[in-house]
Image (cartoon, rainbow, N blue to C red):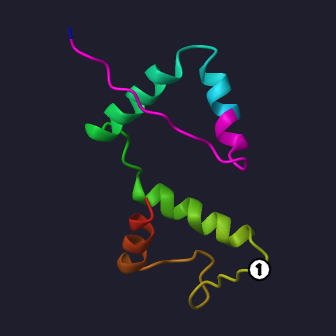
Amino acid sequence: MTKRARYTISFLPTDTDLIQHLDKIKEHKTVSMYVRSLIKKDLYDEHITPDIDNVVEKVILKLKCNKDFSLSPQSNEDEIKISEEQKNIIATLF
């Protein structure tokens, strides 16, 4: 018989959002099942790669809504255009 591996994780007092999320997960499955599925997704790269154009659009929208940050369109265009280099920088965040 194969011996099970056991790991212990701890949460900081400030991790209330994580704790609440795990409490919701526990209503449907065990934390062990949940963590194993997350590890498998990470291991086999099963997470969805975001559509970079969609991500860029969301980033620009968020920046436009932020009053402390100013985005101005180049020339007289209403739409803000970004370069491929800027797109690549945003992509590295994800």
Which residue, as the protein is rendered here, is positioned at the far right?
67
Q: Which residue position is annotated with label 1?
A: 68
Compared with residue 72, is residue 11 higher up or lower down, i.e. above or below? above
Question: Where in the figure is residue 28, as x and y percent of width and height?
Answer: 58, 13
Residue at image position (39%, 27%) is: 6
In which quarter of the view is residue 58 placed?
bottom right
Question: What is the three-letter code of the residue carrying label 1?
Answer: Asp
Q: In the picture, which quadrant includes the C terminus? A: bottom left
Is residue 16 on the magenta stretch? yes
Which residue, as the protein is rendered here, is positioned at the far bottom?
75
Is residue 65 on the magenta stretch? no
Q: In the picture, which quadrant includes the N terminus? A: top left
Q: Secondary structure at mark 1?
A: loop
Residue at image position (65%, 85%) is: 72
Tell me the chief SS of the magenta region: loop
Relative horizontal placement of residue 51, taking residue 13 as reference (left or right): left
Compared with residue 87, is residue 10 higher up or lower down, i.e. above or below? above
Magenta region, residue range:
2-19
Question: Where in the figure is residue 86, as x and y percent of width and height?
Answer: 43, 78
Residue at image position (41%, 50%) is: 50
In which quarter of the view is residue 48 placed?
top left
Question: Where in the figure is residue 56, as x and y percent of width and height?
Answer: 50, 64
Binning the other alpha carbons within 10 Å of mark 1 as few (below 14), some (14 to 19) or many (20 upward) gives: few
Compared with residue 2, is residue 7 higher up or lower down, i.e. above or below? below
Compared with residue 26, is residue 36 higher up or lower down, i.e. above or below? below
